[in-house]
Image (tube, rainbow, N blue to C red):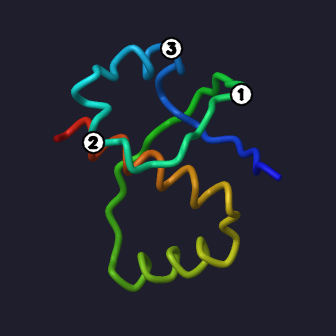
Amino acid sequence: MKKKTTTPLSHSSDEANASLTPASTAALNDLPVIRIVSEEKELFVKLNLEMEDKTHKMLVKWGKEVASDEDYISIAIRAGLEEYVDA
């Protein structure tokens, strides 16, 4: 059975698909197919934070305790897209 998940992205699927040129998709050939079945637009605020190392470690620990599979998928897709755009 295929797993469905919701992943927040800052661009619509049409914009993301339009940005993939044939040459750029060659690097993605080793990835499995992921289809966008729906999208939701959400407002969010991105914060740049500064904190002590001890506080950072505590927040990471708390985050790992409550993170869902969807959270990890969202992070992985966002990181992959950012790396792809930066290349």
Whole-percent x, y for residue 14 in the image? 50, 14
Q: Is residue 29 left or right of residue 68?
A: left
User: Judging from the image, what secondary structure is the residue with disc 2 in?
Assistant: helix
Residue pointed to by mark 2: 27
Residue pointed to by mark 3: 14
Mark found first going from the N terminus, 3 or 2: 3
Mark found first going from the N terminus, 3 or 1: 3
In front: mark 3 or mark 2? 2
Number of other residues with Cα within 10 Å of mark 2, as a class: few under 14, some 14 to 19, many 20 or more: few
Amino acid type at circle 2 is: Ala
- Tell me if residue 42 comes above or below residue 66 in the rendering: above
Residue pointed to by mark 1: 37
Identify the residue shown where x is 25% and y is 35%. 85
Mark on residue 29?
Answer: none
Amino acid type at circle 1 is: Val
User: Judging from the image, what secondary structure is the residue with disc 1 in?
Assistant: loop
Q: Quadrant of the C terminus?
A: top left
